Image (cartoon, helix red, strand yellow):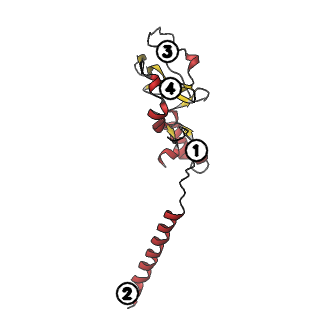
Amino acid sequence: QLLLVGLLIPILFILYLHREVTRLTVEDVTEEVSYVTSTSCRECHSSHYDSWRENTLHPYMFLPVSSPDAKILGDFDSGDPAVTFKKEEIEFVLGSKWEQVYARMIDGEYYPFPAKWYVIEKRWIPYKVNDWHDTPMSYKCNGCHTTGFDPNTLEFAEFGIGCEACH
């Protein structure tokens, strides 16, 4: 009997905890999602943050040109006819290692310029030349290249792929 009671008490306790957790997750979780951004994660997880910044391309997937991390690598002196825009017109940079897409904001929406730079090959290729205006980046790019993208508002919490994109 003592063995039976010894087994029964932990089982009842586990069932109680399961009920409480299930009740909490169903009733207490709100639908409003909020993001604190990667800089907040740094406070408690500095080694992971530093590794993410220094050893991955994630934070550099989509950046405003005003960011000190945004590096425009394309050769604007090449004379390539695919380049129909000026370096000064670029407001956002996507990518950093293999290729870069350059973008601008038009009427509250991000749009790519019609040429992208292949970093390793050091050459331009045409990109969305005839349909750039039909391809707003919010619907095609921002879901993966930003953190906390909301398709209803087209807003996001953080440029690039931050800690909360995965965690």
What's the residue type where badge 4 is placed? Tyr
Q: CA distance from mark 4 to mark 1?
A: 24 Å
Q: Quadrant of the N terminus?
A: bottom left
Instruction: Check contact, mark 1 vs mark 3: CB within 8 A.
Output: no
The residue under label 2 is 4
Instruction: State which tag comes first along the sequence, 1 or 2.
Output: 2
What's the residue type where badge 2 is placed? Leu
Instruction: Check contact, mark 4 vs mark 1: CB within 8 A.
Output: no
- The residue drawn where x is 52% and y is 32% is 62
Q: Could you say which is closer to the camera, residue 54 or residue 5?
A: 5
What's the residue type where badge 1 is placed? Thr
The residue under label 1 is 37
- Residue 46 screen position, x and y as percent: 58, 46
The residue under label 4 is 111
Q: CA distance from mark 1 to mark 3?
A: 33 Å
Residue 75's label in the rendered image is: 3
